Amino acid sequence: MSFNGFTHTDFETFQIEGLESRMEAIQNRIQPKFTEISKEVQSDLEILTGNEMHLHIAKHLRRTKNPPVDTWMAFSHNNRGYKMLPHFQIGLFDDHVFIWLAYIYELPGKQEMATLFLNNLEELHKQIPSSYMISTDHTKKGASEAVKDANLEKVLTRFRDVKKGEFLVGRHIASNDPILKDGEKFIAAVKETFETVMPIYKLSLTDDK
């Protein structure tokens, strides 16, 4: 196991002032860990999806002033990008790691996809554990809530009707959770999460062109 876990220093990266300094820390502290994680989970994800999956590490190239408040890696079945596709994310804010199946606002045809989910709402309720999290905006920590507290129909309706609406489902792991210090346990948690949300991913590809 080459990935040995996350440390407090990784999370402290998001307290560093200045775009250049924070980006340097992200590149030196966190991105190498993303590469190591990918070596452990990519092949499993390919087996689960039945597709070749490609790693994309966020470069934050659009930022010119404000430093990023989070950073992530993503897997999609297109080697040229991920934002316009259903994809899988692993990343960090300053207080937690997130593991998502993500449908973000750049996704073409998201109205049709949201309608598909709404038409299968009962099945989604069965598939998503109550301890999992849902987010309506991948850029904001405050846009997440536990499935047990969320109105899934309302979330999906917003995803359908609001231009910037998003739908992410998966897990949060607090920065002080011991599992993050154990690479093997964390990788197992990632694989378990991806396996749990896989039926949703496959459902969303039923009309994939």
Image (tube, rainbow, N blue to C red):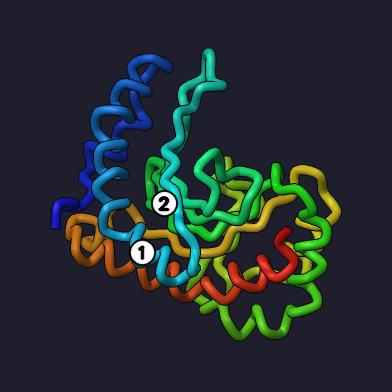
The residue drawn where x is 31% and y is 44% is 34
Judge from the rendering whether residue 136 lies leftward or rightward of residue 207; answer left or right. Answer: left
Residue under pointer 1: 190
Distance from the alpha carbon under mark 2 to that under mark 1:
8 Å
For the point 65% across and 69% down, which residue is it?
150
Q: Secondary structure at mark 2?
A: strand
Badge 2: residue crowd in 10 Å (few <14, some 14–19, many ≥20): many
Label ID, residue 90: 2
Q: Are marks 2 and 1 in contact (CB under 8 Å)?
A: yes
> In the figure, is residue 105 to the left or right of 34?
right
Residue 189 falls left or right of residue 200:
left
* 133 up-or-down from 181: above or below: below
Q: Could you tell me residue 118's position as x and y percent?
A: 79, 73
How many circles with numbers are drawn on the protein? 2
Front residue of this view, candidates 145 and 81: 81
2 or 1: tag closer to the N-terminus: 2
> Based on the displayed image, in which of its 4 quarters is residue 180 positioned?
bottom left
Amino acid beneath label 1 = Val
Provide residue 160's location: percent of width, then percent of height: 81, 57
Examine the image and state in which quarter residue 14 appears. Answer: top left
State the quadrant of the C terminus.
bottom right
Q: Residue 63: x and y, percent?
A: 53, 20
User: Residue most toward the right?
Assistant: 161
At x 24%, y 33%, the residue is 29
Q: Quadrant of residue 128?
A: bottom right
